[in-house]
Image: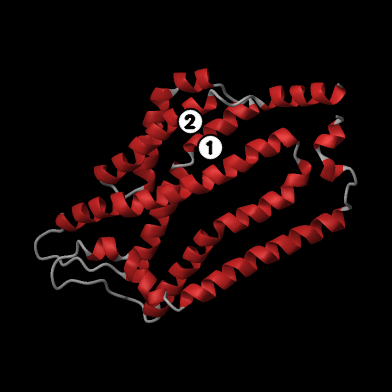
Amino acid sequence: MTESAARPDTDTEQPLIAHLAELRNRLLRCLACVFVVFLGLSLFANDIYSLIAGPLLAQLPEHSSMIATEVAAPFLAPFKLVFFVAVFISVPYLLYQAWAFIAPGLYDNERRLVVPLISSSVLLFYLGCAFAFFVVFPLLFAFLTSTAPDGVTVMTDISHYLNFILKMFFAFGIAFEVPIAIILLVWTGLATVASLAKKRAYIIIGAFTVGMLLTPPDIISQVLLAVPVWLLFELGLILGRFVKRRSEDETETRAAASD
């Protein structure tokens, strides 16, 4: 088995124009996918917004509701949400297109690692968003609405609420990618499991710092972001023990190619 056999798709290198044409086609497919999903969901824009607003609406005082302070907000806010939901749903297909574009340039051992990493990263991002929606939002909104001073009626603007939850979804989705980041650090040789374990105290402090910066100024949301990050860090250390460094994989590949 030769080294070229490990990368069969690179036997005949395509010219730059062909690569750019392929990249354009895959980008167009991605845009078409998001557009089709967006069109399908746009019929239910108001229902989707009501669903996402559920955690806050459940905590609002009686006779209180959300408001729209801008003329076009009742129309634009739901469709803005639908666009992000369309991207959210299309992520597996978007990543598949990215994978199909870069796969011909990877070795077989790299392909075996990248596929589960991409799948796991998508799953962890979805889990982070689900954790934010089902666990963090109910506790957070219950706390925030209960702290309103006497005489102050809680009536949140729909556009401001949308921006807030999108930031929270992104924060928790990215935070849940910690195990993937650790595996990549170990695989590329930038760090080892032992060196990362020694930095555990800094990771915990950093998790609380990130929670403070990305979440509202309350201890509940900060803890609910920092604690999962710490636990996922520990999970990443466990998984990292089973990952070979990239240099070791390449050495094995060259050794197999020379046989």
Instruction: Spot the residue most to the left.
Output: 150
**Percent coordinates x, y for residue 108 in the rendering:** 74, 36
Tell me where residue 55 sits by quadrant. bottom left
Element under disc 2: helix
Q: Are marks 1 and 2 in contact (CB under 8 Å)?
A: yes
| Residue receiving disc 2 | 236
Task: Give left or right: position of 67 versus 1.
Answer: left
Q: Given the image, on which type of amino acid does mark 2 rest? A: Gly
Say left or right for 61 vs 257: left
Q: Is residue 171 visible?
A: no
Q: Residue furthest bottom?
A: 71
| Mark number, residue 180 | 1
Q: Residue at 30% across / 69% down in the picture?
A: 157
Rendered-image quadrant of the C terminus: top right
Badge 2 density bin: few <14, some 14–19, many ≥20, Cα 10 Å? many
Element type at marker 1?
A: helix
